[in-house]
Amino acid sequence: MSAAVRGGSGRQTAAAWILTLPFVVLFLAFTAGPVLGSLGMSFTDLRQRDLRTPFAVNGVGLDNYLKALSDETFRKAALNTAYFVLVGVPLTLGLALAAALLLDRGVKRFQSLFKVGYYLPVITSIVAIAVIWRFVLSPDAGLLNTVLSWIGVDGPNWLASETWAMPSLIMMAVWRNFGSAMIIFLAGLQGIPQTVEEAGQLDGAGSWQRFRYLILPLLRPTVLFTSVTTGIGYLQFFEEPFVMTQGGPLNSTISVSMYTYQQFGFGNYGLATSMSYLLFVVIAVVTFVQFRLLREK
Amino acid sequence: MFTPTTRRRLVIGGAALTATALVLTGCGRSAETGEAAPKATTSVGDGPATGELTVWAMGTEGENLPKLTAAFEQANPGVKVKVTPIPWDAAHSKFTTAITARTTPDAAMVGTTWMGEFADLDALDPTPGNIDTAGFFEGANETTKVGGTSYGVPWYVETRLVYYRKDLAAKAGITTPPTDWEGLKAMAKAMQEKAGAKYGINLQPGGTGSWQTVMPFAWSAGAAITGDDQKEFTFDTPEMQEGLKYYQSFFTDKLAGTDLPPNQTEAQFVSGQVPMFISGPWMAGSVAKLGGEAMKKNIGVFQLPKNRTATSFVGGSNFVVFKNGKNKDSAWKLVKWLSDAKTQAQWFKLSTDLPAVKTAWEDPSIANDPLLPVFGKQLEDAKAPPAIVNWEQVATAFDAEVEKMAKSGQSPADTAKAIQTKAASIGTGS
């Protein structure tokens, strides 16, 4: 391709252009255009009713960004999102890796059954999941509190408690999401040649040592991939609070995405897009840091 | 990949392309606004309706409406009514999208709290002068008015009453329902102490829509959401605080709970755990469905208790005609026909939606019901929030502050102040 563009004959260049044109046009129309448009929008006071005269809106500079940052609820949403990511991502990845190791080593006979079982929540509709978890988390007759009562613990009213609502949602999100990371870990594990471990065994390394000094370093690219994708997904925390708590009680589960969505619903397009861009910047920074920490040395 | 020059050319070309596209659409839009806007219909003609009419309606109303419009088509052989049912949770955005894109139907059912917003978007046709609005309940009629102009007619109404368990009330020694604030509280207390209830009454401790239960108490104490011109919010007043204080006292006295799972009002009512709540007419049906025949005779309702007034909340839906519809005259004929007392009584039998026209309540299917006439009486004193553009946003702020008041003990004075501050920064939108 590069040769064709740079030094090739005119006909080849034309062919290259024709072949890439559909992508370029679609990309400009449906990705680059809207992205630039929304970036511009975030510096205006655009509201729903202005949509019919979009060039009559006023530029307001950084006002929307300052307004978002000084908004008490937005800051609460940012804290909640950070809480969710900092607790949720390590839990998800840890559980995914543990499950992948067990499946990789475990009894081959049930392997596909477990693979399907752990992966099923990933592809199940969030509404169906919400129904199940409402039953699990119900304060009086719920599964969780019933089990807790067997060991003499009086379980809280999970979703209605300011302290417990977020842990409940994290529990639900980890259960729902660890399957996809597990599948990728499993692929990574199966890509490590058996001989590596055999060599370790011959050198007298115990199973923890083999995991720590052989398997984990070889899994580094897989860990990078899963932590970046899971991290981005969790930063966009939305469905769980949206279907389970609507951000309550007392805004203890409202997330940045949810608050942004709410502002879009109110027709405050300028403010809402500025919030999206703030989240975008955070995601970019977090991803950059992850690449720095986990890249191949 | 690309050389610097080709890349630059690509970027510039792309930017130019987007820019032209934006300018083109921009021009298209503004040219369109420059056109003479479709004239408002000032009176409905006498002849039969003709042509094709598209109508949108939400939820079960959307599913049942075709049965009703079939009769309209029979009376007006030249007309064809096409009803599109829309799910409630998608309706608001579908309407605003259609308004922006000018692809609205001819007529539609519209939630009462959306009137201000849609009128502000210049989407609604003012109600023609020869549609008689005197027969509607006053509170319902008010919901069609935005800035003094009426857009559309009330289609069906609902209002809130206090529901109670008759058998448990008897056990608690209460034979006649209370009529004032003190009485309601005493009754809740008696339910708890003598009838074995966990909580005397179920009140929403904040959260979505709780303003609909809080405002009636504030209205009854003399509060108002805005001044008369609907330009300024008036949440921070002694009257508002009085209403909030009364509402909060149910939580501080442990007569109402903040720890009940939501959406289980019916179950708690049937089990006797919480034998009172404040809600609309649909609850009679869902309680009876859950509790069976035996429960039916134990459901009682009474009007909201009185402070200065005994004002409840009026909700429901209006029927509107859109300004840029092609068949407005026939659309208004349909709306006029829908607000006829006979049609309204027939609609009640199809949908159990309560008629907005007073005379329709004389129909035996309503008048002989054990509960419904009480709703009719309450409708004589029922209010809706003013039709302001930003109401949904203000209501969300209101709900959040009520939650703080009920759950974390924020004082009524601070609550009123916080609602006022937030509402003022949101603005009425006009």
Image (cartoon, coloured by chain):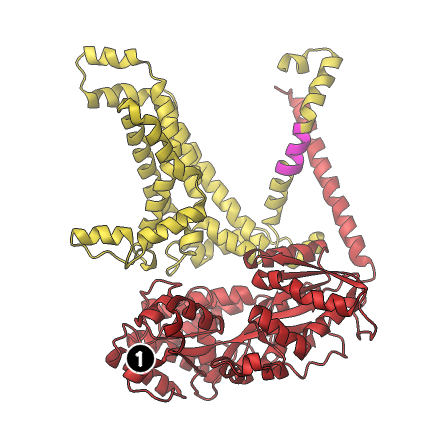
Q: Amino acid at mark 1?
A: Leu
For label 1, the SS is helix
Q: Which residues are magenta?
A: A23-31
Quarter that holds the N terminus of chain B: top right
> In the figure, the yellow chain has which letter?
A
Colour chain B is painted in: red
Considering depth in this image, is B109 or A234 the residue closer to the camera?
A: B109
Residue occupied by mark 1: B168
Quarter that holds the C terminus of chain B: bottom right
For residue B426, side relative to residue B329 (left or right): left
Instruction: Assess disc 1: are there few (<14), some (14-19) or many (≥20) residues with their C-alpha within 10 Å of its C-alpha.
Output: many
Seen in the picture, residue B110 relative to A148 is either above or below; the reply is below
Q: Check the residue under mark 1 and report the chain it is in.
A: B
Q: Residue at x 37, y 70 (%)?
A: B405
Residue B250, image x, y percentages: 33, 77
Find out whether residue B51 is within the magenta segment: no
Residue A101 shows up from this direction: yes
Considering depth in this image, is A51 or B123 the residue closer to the camera?
A: B123
Residue B354, image x, y percentages: 57, 75
